[in-house]
């Protein structure tokens, strides 16, 4: 294994509060249900479609809403931090010879701003998907450009949509438990690895 590709929000970045406040600002504008912190916990094992129904969010509005959320994120980047232990984890993996990449549906500018803010130098590349369900297309393009096989890559993420994208292109997936989606939901898709701390992630890959 040569490349480790990380999701960003919920995997590296503890962006729950900022994204929740962004959602609530837009919810008032579009008449969606507002989200409280406890809702993030109770909804962990709901699918995206079930959450959309719960919060009265029509999925066809996603192309309109998502850019607004990430614009809010950009304006409040100073409030976003990495999860505890993430910087040390990335540094250790880089020192072990892995190439660290980020693939996210968040804006590239937002990710690079946070990396700069947190003084992260171990990430070699930031890839983004303009579509929230389009990561498999980006992964295919990456493999073709770098001329690498699926077994040379590991994707690390916290959401079902991440593992579904990986399954489409045959890339092994590692789920981290500190993110958005719950274990009950994730286990249905049979991830190769499940880890509960950044330290455990390093141990597994060592």
Image: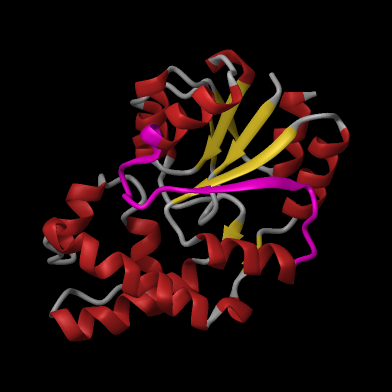
Say which residue appears at 78% left-offset and 29% top-offset.
203
Q: Is residue 55 above or below residue 9?
A: below
Left or right: 66 in relation to 19: left
Give yes or no for residue 133 being in the magenta stretch. yes
Near-viewer residue (131 or 56): 131
Q: Position of residue 58 (x, y in %)?
A: 11, 61
Say which residue appears at 47% left-offset and 62% top-offset.
107
Q: Is residue 166 above or below residue 60?
A: above
Left or right: 181 in relation to 14: left
Say which residue appears at 56% left-offset and 49% top-offset.
11
Q: Is residue 67 visible?
A: yes
Quadrant housing residue 190:
top left
Q: Is residue 67 above or below residue 203?
A: below
Q: Position of residue 85 (x, y in %)?
A: 76, 53
Q: Is residue 173 visible?
A: no
Q: Quadrant of the C terminus?
A: top right
Residue range in magenta is 118-137
Say which residue appears at 16% left-offset and 61% top-offset.
54
Q: Quadrant of the N terminus?
A: top right
Near-viewer residue (37 or 48): 48
């Amino acid at each position: 294994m040569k490349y480790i590709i990380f999701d960003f929000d919920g995997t590296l970045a503890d962006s729950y509060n900022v994204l929740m406040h962004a959602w609530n600002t837009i919810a008032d504008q579009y008449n969606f249900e507002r989200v409280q912190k406890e809702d993030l916990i109770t909804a962990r094992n709901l699918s995206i479609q079930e959450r959309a129904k719960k919060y009265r969010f029509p999925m066809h509005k996603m192309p309109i809403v998502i850019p607004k959320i990430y614009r809010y994120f950009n304006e409040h980047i100073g409030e976003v931090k990495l999860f505890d232990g993430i910087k040390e984890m990335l540094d250790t993996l880089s020192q072990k010879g892995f190439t660290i990449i980020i693939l996210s549906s968040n804006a590239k500018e937002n990710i690079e701003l946070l990396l700069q803010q947190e003084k992260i130098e171990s990430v070699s590349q930031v890839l983004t998907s303009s579509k929230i369900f389009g990561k498999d297309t980006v992964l295919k393009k990456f493999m073709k450009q770098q001329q690498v096989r699926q077994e040379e890559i590991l994707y690390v993420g916290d959401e079902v949509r991440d593992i579904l994208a990986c399954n489409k292109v045959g890339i092994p997936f590692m789920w981290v438990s500190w993110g958005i989606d719950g274990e009950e939901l994730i286990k249905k898709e049979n991830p190769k690895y499940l880890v509960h701390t950044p330290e455990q992630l390093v141990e597994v890959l060592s």
